Amino acid sequence: MPRIRWSTERAHEVSCDLLAVPVFKGGGGVPREVAAALGADPAELLEQAELKAELGDALALPLPPAARAKRVLLVGMGEKAKADPGVARKAGAVVARRAGRATSVASTIAASVRGPAPVAAGAFAEGFLLGSYRFERYKSNGSGRAVPDLALVGGAARDARAVGRAIERAEILAGATNLARDLTNTPAGDLSPEALATEAGRLAKSCGLQIEVLTEKELREGGFGGILGVGQGSGRPPRMVVLRYRPAGARRRVALVGKGITFDSGGINLKTQQLDWMKMDMGGAAAVLGALQAVSRLKAKVAVTGVLCSAENMPGGNALHPGDVIRIRGGKTVEVGDTDAEGRLVLADGLSYAVEKGADVIADAATLTGACMTALGRRAFGVMGSSHVEVKRVLDAAGRAGEIAWELPLFPSYRKLLDSDVADLINISRRDFGGGAITAGLFLKEFTGDVPWVHLDIAGAAKSDSEEFEVPKGASGASVRTLVEWILAMAPARAS
Ligand code: BES
Ligand code: MN
Ligand code: ZN
């Protein structure tokens, strides 16, 4: 872990490999002494390099030997009036990506944006840590580089304590997101449901969580027909994992249910497209693990139960047949119209279980539908739910977390599309009707009883094909920070 510190030092006073300073559109932002050391107008230097001061533009320049910093990075910030903590988060990621071989970075960017100093510093540090993420476990010749230490300079002494707490929080949020990214990037060959349960065990140990792992025997005895059914075509058995964070004096009981399909081949309705993505079909379960790590480290005064519904969806000789009828925990029967609509089957078990155990509110995260990706694109996730109040809270939490979320409706009149001729429900609606993200949400709703519930469809957002600010190529860790912000808002982390 890099060391992130905050200080009242002035930019030209810090010794570092790289000093990152803001340049706003129309000029301004670079501390006077740094501009003097450069010996030219920073905005003109950017222009000479055919760059503007747009967010994302950045230019590294050497400084004369007399300067304390070896190099300066001019970081485009866009318009000064629009520079808020969200911009600081993105700038933090730009700095991380341009740090090269630097082992120490200093920056005045957080001190240059509007908003309370702790919020700006936290956002910048978070962006820096998220942008520093690399997945190199399988690289023989990875960069091998450690993330550089970071000094946030140019602040006011009175903010020291609050900024210190904000930096710690940023480290926890970025760490949790990066945990979810690591798990989601891990190939299915190395991450079976059993291996996911082992990872959950490791997390439980390090964070002091209670854990219960249900193997096939317990799943059978408990009537978890969704998880068992989806997993029965694979040589690698399914698991349900229950993790409990139980702080003293908790104000609310939250359940987080995660889709943990470690590989989604489609089953007998074998996929013909995007199979190479499908190791990431456990991104929802990974997000739940990340959120649990963060809320426990932040000592949130909320009781949180995580339920991971994990199976490998494979077309084996024992696999579910299209047309099979399975029985979900709690007794409802489901006709399997399509074995590729497996996420809702495993989640139905997990949601029923969460309702049964008593929760004040439930959220699930799932790479559930290609339809949601079509509707909202590859950065945003869809939010649906039975409680408008909770949906709104999740959308607000996403805003604070710097994630893009958008509400999709759960039209009651669409529910009849899920009527089955032979069972209580069918897991697929007519394809030509469209609205696949909504009908999937309506299916899940059937298993949430009277408990306020919110569903996050992260199918599009969980994996990125390109780097963009704090989002790396590959697994993004989508929804971790939103879930944590949502839970923290129920009870502040600490008296401040
Ligand atoms: N895991 C997929 C959804 C998905 C698709 C995630 C593409 C990421 C990228 C899910 O299990 C699935 O296959 N959904 C089907 C549902 C359909 C059969 C009703 C889909 O979206 O096509
Ligand atoms: Mn599927
Ligand atoms: Zn799936």
Image (spheres, helix red, strand yellow):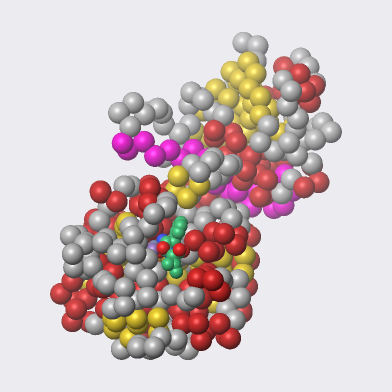
Q: Position of residue 26 (x, y in %)?
A: 84, 33
Q: Which residues are magenta?
A: 113-138
The image quarter containing residue 269 is bottom left
Between 381 and 230, which is closer to the camera in this rendering?
230
The image quarter in which residue 207 lies:
bottom left
The picture quadrant where one finds residue 295 is bottom left
Task: Name the side, left or right, on which 426 lies relative to 393.
Answer: left
Q: Is residue 319 left or right of residue 303?
A: left
Furthest residue in direction top, as rendered = 65
Q: Residue at x 37, y 75 (%)?
A: 337
Q: Relative to 446, does residue 277 appear above or below in the rendering?
A: above
Q: Furthest residue to the right?
A: 26
Q: Horizontally, is 179 left or right of 314 in the view?
A: right
Q: Position of residue 443 (x, y in %)?
A: 45, 79
- x 49%, y 38%: residue: 132
Where's ligand 1: which quadrant? Answer: bottom left
Which residue appears farthest toward the front when viewing the image?
Answer: 432
| Residue 65: x %, y % from top left | 62, 10
Q: In the picture shown, does residue 342 fall above or below 448?
A: above
Q: Nearer the viewer, residue 231 or 135?
A: 231
Picture quarter with the N terminus: top left
**Per the image, is 75 magenta?**
no
One can see residue 304 in this view: no
Query: Is residue 82 visible to us here?
Result: yes
Residue nearer the viewer, 24 or 109? 24
Q: Nearer the viewer, residue 176 or 411?
A: 411
